[in-house]
Every structure is written in C-alpha cells, then in structure tokens.
Amino acid sequence: MPIEQTLILIKPDGMRRQLTGLTIDRLDAAGLELVAAKMVSVSTELAEKHYAEHVGKPFYPNLIKYIRGEFHAFPDHRVLAMVYRGEGCIAKVREVAGATNPEQAKPGTIRGSFGRVTTAGQFENVLHASANAADAAREVALWFKTAEILP
Ligand SMILES: Nc1ncnc2c1ncn2[C@@H]1O[C@H](COP(=O)(O)OP(=O)(O)OP(=O)(O)O)[C@@H](O)[C@H]1O
Ligand SMILES: [Mg+2]
C-alpha cells in the first residue's frame, strides 16, 4: 500500500465535547503518524472552499454553519486541523471515523460512538476525514502550508 497523507478536522461539536484526545488515541492506535496540527478559526471563505463539492445540496447552508461552530449558543469557530501519514492512511482513517450519518455508523467507530443527528436533521459527526487521494491532496493544501507539515 502507498504511503498517503490525509486531512483530519475535529469539528466544533468534537471540540466542544472534548473528543480530541480520544480521536488522536485511536488514530495513533491505527499505526498512523501525526505530521501536522494547528487550531484554525474557520472563516466563511475557508468553509466554502473546503465544502465546494456540496454547493447546492439541501444541507449545504447548515453545513457551513456547522463547520464554523455556529450551531452553538456560544459560537466558537475553532477546529483542530491535522495531517496524518501512513500506509493506506486515507481508508484507515475513514474506517476509524465510521459512516457519515452517525446513526448508520458502526458501533465502536468514532461517529458510531459519539456522533449524533440533531432533531433538525443535522449530522454532528465529530470529525472530517478526506475521502480519497485527490480530495486529500486538495484539502491538505487548503488547510496547511508545506512548511507546517513534517517532511
Ligand atoms: N444528508 C445529510 N444531511 C445532513 N448533513 C449531511 C448530509 N450528508 C452530509 N452531511 C454533512 O456534510 C459533511 C460532508 O459530507 P460528505 O458526503 O463529504 O461526508 P463525509 O466525507 O463522510 O464527511 P466529511 O467530508 O466531513 O469527512 C458530512 O460530514 C456531514 O457533516
Ligand atoms: Mg467528505
């Protein structure tokens, strides 16, 4: 399997619910290497670039609010952005994360254990993980400068 990089974001619900340590533990246990990390205050511009593929979908406006932390009574725009590296890293992280819809995520995955669907139908699924090699390359370059990633 090739050595890959993938972008992980602890989303605002994961930050607020203090699921950062747990998520990092599980990715470490999967044999993946953390090669970049920083707190990011997510602007509307960054959110729109990150989720460009979802423009026009019914859940898009709320998705932008969600990733910016605006569903909470005390808006907090921070997410923890990380790059992981390892063999088959993209698929391994998706496996640990679980399915997009927390109600369909396998028990024991991060989303299966800790994600939820709000009464308004919003998925609060704790983390973002790049879906494939092309997305990973685009997303890592969007969130990180080359110099911020361990060589
Ligand atoms: N049907 C839906 N209803 C509500 N929110 C949704 C729906 N589908 C996707 N989303 C939201 O949009 C995000 C991006 O959707 P995508 O299809 O890329 O899923 P994903 O790749 O599993 O998640 P992510 O990109 O966040 O890792 C999801 O994580 C979720 O927050
Ligand atoms: Mg996705």
Image: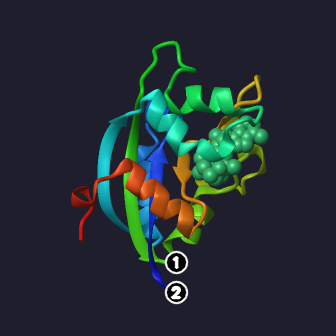
Q: Give the CA distance from mark 2 to mark 1.
A: 6 Å
The single residue placed furthest to the top in the displayed view is 73
Q: Residue at x 59, y 70 (%)?
A: 91
Q: Amino acid at mark 2?
A: Met
- Is residue 138 depicted above or below 72 in this figure? below
Q: Taking 125 as reference, is 122 left or right?
A: right
- Secondary element under disc 1, as helix, strand or loop, is loop
Q: Taking 6 as reference, is 57 left or right?
A: right
Figure quadrant of residue 126:
top right
Name the residue that disc number 2 marks: 1
- Is residue 38 depicted above or below 132 in this figure? above
Q: Quadrant of ligand 1?
A: top right
Nearer to the camera, 62 or 100: 62
x then y, percent, for residue 131: 60, 61
x then y, percent, for residue 17: 48, 33
Q: Amino acid at mark 1?
A: Gly
Q: Taking 36 as reference, is 42 left or right?
A: right
Q: Earlier in the sequence, mark 2 or mark 1?
A: 2
Q: Residue at x 77, y 29 (%)?
A: 121
Name the residue that disc number 1 marks: 88
x then y, percent, for residue 37: 31, 51
**How many numbered marks have been drawn onto this rendered protein structure?**
2
Question: Do the residues under discs 2 and 1 have CB atoms within 8 angstroms?
Answer: yes
Which quadrant, please, contains the C terminus? Answer: bottom left
- Secondary element under disc 2, as helix, strand or loop, is loop
Q: Residue at x 42, y 27 (%)?
A: 77
State how the image is colored: rainbow
x then y, percent, for residue 48: 54, 36
Figure quadrant of residue 118:
top right
- Is residue 2 depicted above or below 43 in this figure? below
Res. 26 in view: no
